[in-house]
Amino acid sequence: MGNQRCYQASQSWDIYIPMVVGAYNAQVHSTTKVSPNKIIFYPSHHSSDLHYPSYLDDPEYQKEYDDLLAKTRKLLTNSQTNKTTKDHPFKVDMIVYRKILDIFGNQRKLVERYKEPYIIKSIDDETGDCKLNYITAKGREARRRDGFISAHVKQLKIATRQ
């Protein structure tokens, strides 16, 4: 009889495993002294000073909630407006080198990290994106069919004349 139950359980394991997991998660853990289900699904383990109901019918709660939201919005907007933008030394028509990004591992120690001279055609001050044009060995600007090469200010290095 016991053999038959084990055989039936092995045939329908997808029914019994969730039952076993549910039983395990409902038991009190020896370390935390709380069941895993209570830790995961009940908000009582969070320590918060303010407790708001899910509905705000009371005008006192509404005012307190609105003040908290206004304060939070003000802090967020102040943190965005007070961001300092880092100045970069690059200007339009400056000759620069662009960093090679597709090299990884120990190879990058042995090869040059910056590629060919480029001339900056435009710089987006907000994002730091630059449009670059390639300069040939004879000093001429090479036009690409698909337009300019894009790079970020952090990928550029000022070209020094030799």
Image (cartoon, rainbow, N blue to C red):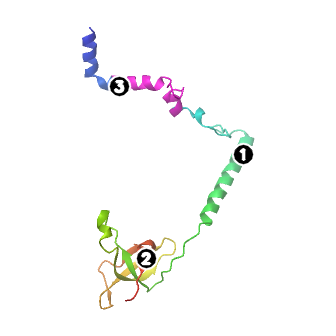
**For mark 1, does the 10 Å Cα neighbourhood hold few (<14), some (14 to 19), or many (20 or more) residues?**
few
Residue 60: image quadrant is: top right
* Residue marked by disc 2: 130
Which of the image's four quarters has the C terminus? Answer: bottom left
| Residue at screen point 49% across, 29% down | 36
* Residue marked by disc 1: 64
| Residue at screen point 38% across, 79% down | 97
Instruction: Give amino acid for label 3.
Output: Ile
Query: Is residue 101 found left or right of 1 in the rendered image?
Result: right
Query: x%, y% of residue 107?
Result: 29, 67
Distance from label 2 to label 1 (Cα)? 47 Å
**Over which residues does the magenta segment extend?**
16-40
Q: What SS does tag 2 mark?
A: strand
* Residue marked by disc 3: 17
| Residue at screen point 37% across, 76% down | 98
Magenta part, dominant SS: helix
Distance from label 2 to label 3 (Cα)? 57 Å
Task: Farthest residue to the right: give it.
Answer: 60
Query: Is residue 121 found left or right of 51 in the rendered image?
Result: left
- The correct choice, above or below, for 24 with respect to 46 in the image is above
**Does residue 22 show up magenta in the picture?**
yes
Instruction: Give amino acid for label 1.
Output: Glu
Query: Is residue 15 found left or right of 78 in the rendered image?
Result: left
**Does residue 114 show up magenta in the picture?**
no
Nearer to us: label 3 or label 1: 3
Query: x%, y% of residue 39?
Result: 53, 32
Q: What SS does tag 3 mark?
A: helix
Q: What SS does tag 1 mark?
A: helix
